[in-house]
């Protein structure tokens, strides 16, 4: 439910008195009222964004604290296992990257059922073209 604000009441009264005012004076006063409303809305939007940022910061801090607590609770064997897992993950990622790069390379063009080499015509390729 929207609640009336003093600025909206002021704008309504200005509208009622508009016929008794010059256009320039009315525009000037209604602009001031609209600027007040805009400033209030922007302030509320800023407060809402700050609340969202604060909630996100709290979430991230809780996540990081949980990680730190988990790390502090590990013994030496668990730490070694963790770092071995990290190393395995890096090696797997590197292997996958190399395989993807190899798949991305363009295969050689095929002419007349044979693989063509750059700058050289094959006998089968010449005969196929005839």
Image: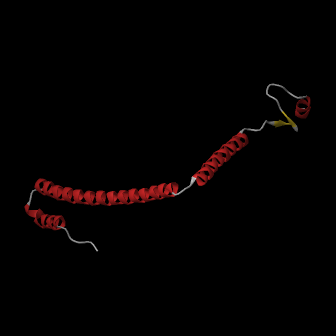
Q: Quadrant of residue 1?
A: bottom left
> Residue drawn at (38%, 60%), measured in percent from left and top?
55
Residue 90 vertical placement versus 23 (above, below): above
Residue 22 vertical placement versus 103 (above, below): below
Q: Position of residue 13 (x, y in %)?
A: 13, 67
Q: Position of residue 6 (x, y in %)?
A: 16, 67
* Closer to the camera in the image, 51 or 29: 51
* Closer to the camera in the image, 5 or 63: 63
Q: Quadrant of residue 51?
A: bottom left
Figure disc tally:
0
Q: Quadrant of the C terminus?
A: top right
> Residue drawn at (79%, 36%), measured in percent from left and top?
109
* Closer to the camera in the image, 17 or 124: 124
Q: Position of residue 94 (x, y in %)?
A: 66, 43
In this image, 82 relative to 29: left or right? right
> Residue drawn at (73%, 38%), measured in percent from left and top?
106
Q: Position of residue 93 (x, y in %)?
A: 65, 46
In this image, 59 relative to 29: left or right? right
């Amino acid at each position: 439910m929207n609640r009336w604000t003093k600025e909206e009441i002021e704008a309504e009264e200005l509208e009622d008195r508009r016929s008794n005012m010059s256009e320039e004076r009315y525009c000037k006063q209604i602009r001031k009222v609209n600027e007040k409303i805009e400033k209030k809305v922007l302030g509320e939007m800023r407060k809402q964004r700050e609340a969202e940022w604060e909630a996100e910061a709290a979430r991230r801090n809780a996540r990081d604290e949980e990680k730190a607590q988990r790390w502090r609770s590990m013994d030496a064997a668990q730490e070694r296992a963790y770092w071995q897992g990290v190393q395995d993950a890096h090696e797997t990622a590197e292997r996958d990257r190399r395989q993807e790069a190899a798949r991305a390379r363009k295969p050689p063009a095929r002419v007349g059922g044979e693989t063509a080499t750059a700058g050289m015509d094959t006998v089968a390729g010449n005969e196929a073209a005839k």
